[in-house]
Amino acid sequence: MPSHKTTIQIDGSLPRRELRRKVVDQFLKEDPGTGTGDNTSRYTYYVEKLQDGSRIYLTRPAYLKKGFDFRISVEGKVFLTGRDYPKHDDIFEDLEKKKQENPTLYKKLHKAMIRIWNCEEPSEVLKDLNALEFESGFTVELILKTLKWFLIEQDIRDWNYSGRGMFKSRLDKIAYLGSLCVVCGKIINRLPWHCPLCEACVCPLCAYRIENLRCPKCGTALEV
Ligand SMILES: [Zn+2]
Ligand SMILES: [Zn+2]
């Protein structure tokens, strides 16, 4: 059975439900396989192109060989797997290094990633970043475009839950743990409340006591 390769374009600014529908609609067009090995129906979908010319692609079947699962790869890169497909930890470890390298720039990157999480298209978000660069690790472009697909993967895999939400709490932890509470001054070691406007962090204990749930620094209503 031949393996199929196609390029597809999925606009990352679609709402979550539409994003998921577009991707699954594509998979529904696949021929069923007739067995294992040569009888497997195999598909490669090129979904993003990076500035250096390498492409991000999805392959099916994925590891677990189940349902709508897919694997995300980046041509010409080597990840923790020793191959060209990253694990979530490839991204998280890379982000930790970037935060250490430059905490100020990292705040910008974190905001950009939250925009992807909120279903904005990476190519649009990148335009606002003015060539944000770090010395360490992957390019910001690779991070944002891979993140888009990890989040779609989570939306499909955790169909009725929010895998996307778990991914965000990891991102928030990397961004905010270790910063200082603006009320008590202690180091924050649990996911804090943070002000969406001034980025001030309030430790869970102080947040519990804050009046009117307003940012103690700038007065904005806190996200609960
Ligand atoms: Zn505190
Ligand atoms: Zn604030």
Image (cartoon, rainbow, N blue to C red):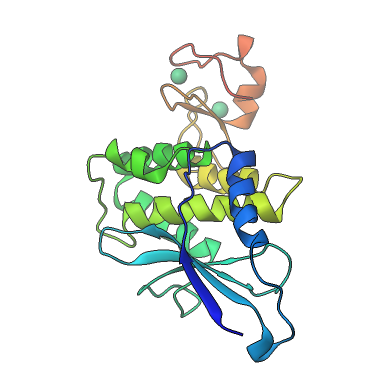
Q: Quadrant of the N terminus?
A: bottom right
Residue at (48, 43) in percent of width and height: 12
Residue at (32, 59) in percent of width and height: 50
Q: Can residue 97 be seen in this view?
A: no
Residue at (62, 47) in percent of width and height: 20
Q: Name the spot of residue 125 as percent of width and height, x first.
A: 36, 39
Q: Name the spot of residue 111 as percent of width and height, x first.
A: 41, 36
Front-most of 194 and 142? 142
Q: Is residue 206 visible?
A: yes
Q: In which quarter of the image is the C terminus?
A: top right
Front-most of 223 and 114? 114
Please state the quadrant of the image where ligand 2 appears. top left
Q: Name the spot of residue 153 as percent of width and height, x first.
A: 60, 56
64 sits to left or right of 102: right
64 sits to left or right of 46: right
Q: Name the spot of residue 210 as percent of width and height, x first.
A: 61, 16
Q: Is residue 144 above or below residue 203?
A: below
The picture quadrant where one finds residue 30 is: bottom right
